[in-house]
Amino acid sequence: MTFKIPVSVLVVIHTPDLQMLLIERARHPGFWQSVTGSLDREDERPFDTAVREVAEETGLDALAAGHHLRDWQESSWYEIFPEWRHRYAPGVTRNLEHVFSLQIPQAVPVTLAPREHVDQQWLPAAAAAERVFSPTNRAAILRLAQRPAWPAQPVLR
């Protein structure tokens, strides 16, 4: 069995007016979240993981013209839910999560990965923060809502 790498990304997708995209987990009805995903390989950069996961979970191209993917240069450790620990090597109980945001010009329907997610919604930041199940996701949404507008800038690769 190949174990998951305990390093992941969280990508908060939003519009300029701070409408946040949330997606509902297929295996856990009522568990809403932003895009998340683990590194596929030890040498995969979190930036590349963020681009890949956005495409896999929403069909969006994070590097498309008019899209602004930002690496917050922030990460935090969180406790892996006991029900998901079997996916990691024995004894692994914590995951390092890197935070990104992706601003797109407007709220659009996305193409969900049906095995992973079953529904989507765009919500204002306060409502999105209330709906997500993850404390780190909630904190990232609230921090994003408090930041001054970022100027348009080229994506750093």
Image (cartoon, rainbow, N blue to C red):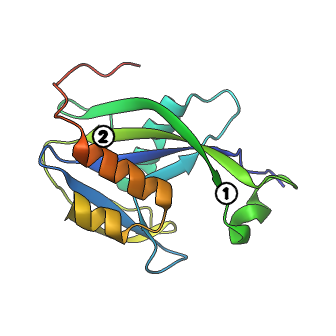
**Three-letter amino acid code of the residue under disc 2:** Leu
The answer to whether residue 15 shows anywhere in this view is yes
Query: What residue is shown with label 1?
Result: 79
Residue 149 percent location from the top left of the image: 16, 34
Q: Quadrant of the N terminus?
A: bottom right
Residue 59 seen in the figure: no
Indicate the position of residue 12 as horizontal and vertical percent values.
35, 48
Q: Which residue bears the numbered disc 2?
A: 102
Q: Secondary structure at mark 1?
A: strand
Q: Residues within 10 Å of mark 1 (few under 14, many from 20)?
A: few
> Could you say which quadrant of the image residue 114 lies in?
bottom left
Residue 37, horizontal then vertical, whole percent: 54, 49
Q: Nearer the viewer, residue 46 or 109?
A: 46
The C terminus is located in which quarter?
Answer: top left
Numbered badge on residue 5:
none
Please state which amino acid type lies under the numbered disc 1. Glu
The x and y percentages for residue 70 are 34, 31
